[in-house]
Image: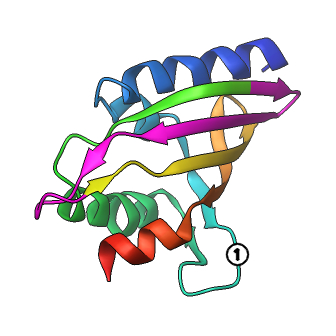
Amino acid sequence: MSTTENKRLIESIFSELSKGNDQPFLEAMAEDVQWIWMGSGQWAKTFQGKQSVVNDLWGAVKTTLIPPYKATATRILADGDYVVVEATGENMTPDGKLYNNRYCWVCRMGEGKLQTINEYMDTELVTNTFQ
């Protein structure tokens, strides 16, 4: 896919994520997708494959946050197979804590699918919210 097509796909995914619809996002993942929480601390982790992302990562999101999960893109930049998204979450935990993390996702696309997501986030907010 072209740079423009890759950017349009991510724009459409985030248009739906901002409404709480995660299906286009999940459907756009390659079977061998790799999602990496960047860093070196306790929150650094890699999810290998769509099954791990859906079950381990997204399964945890659905139990630690009140559904639906929402994230709104504030900037999307694209260059070839890479699309970079700055986004802000709009979420709450079951015990009433706001969880509006800020993210930067560096997405590598291939054959119209998300191949890799390198996620940068506010890990201090994650620690304060979930520990």
Q: Where's residue 115, x and y in %?
A: 67, 47
What type is the residue that disc 1 sits on? Gly
Q: Residue at x 29, y 66 (%)?
A: 60
Which of the image's four quarters has the N terminus? top right
Above or below residue 108? Residue 80 is above
Residue at mark 1: 39
Q: Which residue is drawn at 34% across and 37% down?
A: 70
Q: How is the image coloured?
A: rainbow
Above or below residue 18? Residue 93 is below
Q: Where's residue 90, x and y in %?
A: 34, 39
User: Which quarter of the picture shows residue 73?
Assistant: top right
In the image, 116: left or right of 101? right
Q: Where's residue 122, x and y in %?
A: 56, 62
User: Which quarter of the picture shows residue 35?
Assistant: bottom right
Where are the magenta residues, as a range?
77-97
Q: Residue at x 60, y 55 (%)?
A: 33
- What count of labels does the image hold? 1
- Seen as rendered, the residue at the extreme left is 95
- Classified by dominant secondary structure, the portion drawn in magenta counts as strand
In the image, 106: left or right of 80? left
* Magenta span contains residue 86: yes
Above or below residue 45? Residue 22 is above
User: Which quarter of the picture shows residue 7?
Assistant: top right
Does the rendering let one see residue 26? yes
Q: Where's residue 124, x and y in %?
A: 52, 72
In the image, 24: left or right of 62? right
Q: Decide which of 87, 44 is in the foreground and name it.
A: 87
